[in-house]
Image (cartoon, rainbow, N blue to C red):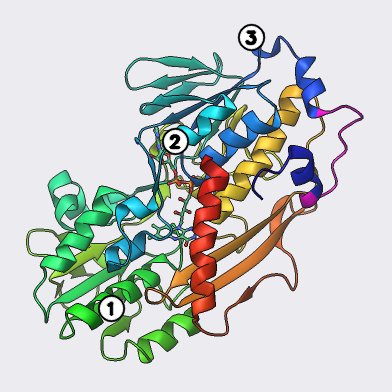
Amino acid sequence: MNSLTRRDFVKSVGALSLAGSSAVAGIAGCATVGGAAKPKVVVVGGGFGGATAAKYIAMWSEGKIDVTLVERGDAFVSCPLSNLVVGGSKSIGDISVAYDGLNKYGIKRVKGEATGFDPDKKTLSLADGTTLPYDRLILSPGIDFMLDSLPGLTSADARAKVLAAWKAGPETVALRNQLTAMTDGGVFAIHIPKAPFRCPPGPYERACQVAWYFQQSKPKSKVLILDANEDVISKKGLFTKAWGGQFKGLIEYRNNQEIQDVDAKTNTLKMTFGEDLKADVLNVLPPMRAGTIATANGLNNSNKRWCQVDWLTYESTAVKNVHILGDSLQIAPLMPKSGHMANQHGKVCAAAVIALLTGDVVNATPMVANTCYSFIDDKNVVHVSSVHRYDAAQKTMVVVAGSGGLSAEANRTEGVFANSWARNIWADMLT
Ligand SMILES: Cc1cc2nc3c(=O)[nH]c(=O)nc-3n(C[C@H](O)[C@H](O)[C@H](O)COP(=O)(O)OP(=O)(O)OC[C@H]3O[C@@H](n4cnc5c(N)ncnc54)[C@H](O)[C@@H]3O)c2cc1C
């Protein structure tokens, strides 16, 4: 969906009446929205949801909306493909993209930590004391961890030893280094929390990548998957085929493996049932919730964990003029927490925010798609896909009957597609 005009996109996702006026003309006639010369949109988070929303608002409004992107990181580092860095077939440089590509759209970029917002004054605050005024605020902060249930991981030292590596970056490299330092014959154990969490197939893909590395370099070693869920929650047949086939004897899967705590000093999991379990390299994915900027500011109105939105605009149901995208959302049925999905949220939200700021009509029938590839080894890949449409009666997104699909088996052609998918979606967000 690279370089689509807003009109093309809106047409492609459903019928939208532009009420006889172009989006740009509408904005030009809206010179004093929020008391400013141009309407102001501030986006927090330069990941899959936020970077997409910032780019598409700036591009589709042709600079008639003032867009500021606040991001704490220096560059975008992709979680998709980051398991290949753990497995050793890609480097962190291969999955990093600079933010400079957004400059040509006139997006103002602010490197900093957003800490809170004032919904009455419509201002966002940053940790360094900066205040940014907005007419519409868009938050796509991803996930943060719920460490209350795992006191052994509350200290930074413990988390530097027992890594999650569930936000791509230095931890991804550190986990790779732990694996290369491990002696042959060791055990890598990954603990998976109860769903929902970021990227349902991601932990199983990681297990395959580590097994692939062991197969070549440390064949006496073993991968242990300790899943708190009752069963494999994504692409089950495809993953279990690999575990019983090319990785037979290398990967062991155990279900219902709930933990009470982690002892980082000894790399030990304190199991709720059964004996404690020690590993040479321990990788714990703690339970997850919406990003802290959302939870610390009252947007987590679903089990105090995730954020509910109006699926037509992605506006929070808790706070007006604040929109939320990506992994922080309380998902609609069968909607995964994926980068592809967050990118689609970003586009629907961009079109809606432009419409809201210009008195235009918001699309009443948005439709989004998801494709999620998983690498079994460095070349063979499987995918799952789905299409989701807005259901006006239920006021949520539902899967389109008969849409989507699943690979028949892991194959090299999808390996080529998966690498292209990554390059294309990074370009779509960031160039
Ligand atoms: C190992 C792994 C593999 C994955 N594989 C795939 C895959 O193959 N396909 C797929 O579609 N998805 C995949 N995902 C899931 C995908 O990465 C997420 O669903 C996606 O990143 C969600 O986008 P987001 O915008 O919600 O969050 P993110 O992309 O994480 O972006 C959030 C951004 O906000 C910034 N931020 C947060 N809070 C603040 C703040 N207060 N101030 C300033 N900046 C802030 C962060 O630095 C970050 O850059 C994978 C995830 C993992 C962990």
Q: Quadrant of residue 126?
A: top left
- Taking the image as shown, residue 28 lies to the left or right of residue 336, namely right
- The amino acid type of the residue labelled 2 equals Tyr
In three-dimensional space, the C-alpha distance between marks 1 and 3, rounded to whole angstroms, equals 56 Å
- Residue 270: image quadrant is bottom left
> What residue sits 31% from the left and 91% below the top?
248
Q: Residue at x 25, y 75 (%)?
A: 213
Image-based side of 377 in relation to 397, left or right: left
Q: Magenta stretch mostly in which secondary structure?
A: loop
At horizontal 65% and vertical 23% (from top left) the residue drawn is 63
Disc 2 + disc 3, Cβ < 8 Å: no
Q: Residue at x 73, y 11 (%)?
A: 31
Q: Residues within 10 Å of mark 3 (few under 14, many from 20)?
A: some
| Of residues 380 and 37, the one drawn nearer to the viewer in this rendering | 380
| Residue closest to the eye, 258 or 202 | 202
Residue type at mark 3: give it. Answer: Ala
- The answer to whether any part of residue 316 appears in the image is no
Front: mark 1 or 3 = 1
228 sits to left or right of 175 = right
Please report whichever mark, 1 or 3, sits nearer to the chain's N-terminal start: 3
Disc 1 residue type (three-letter) = Ala
Q: Is residue 20 inside the magenta stretch?
A: yes
Q: Which of the numbered marks, if any, corresponds to residue 99?
A: 2
Q: Residue furthest right?
A: 20
Q: Position of residue 147 (x, y in %)?
A: 28, 50
Q: CA distance from mark 2 to mark 3?
A: 27 Å
Part of the protein shown in magenta: 12-22
Ligand 1 under 8 Å from disc 2 Cβ: no
Q: Tell me residue 276's x, y (percent).
A: 15, 73
Mark linked to residue 211: 1
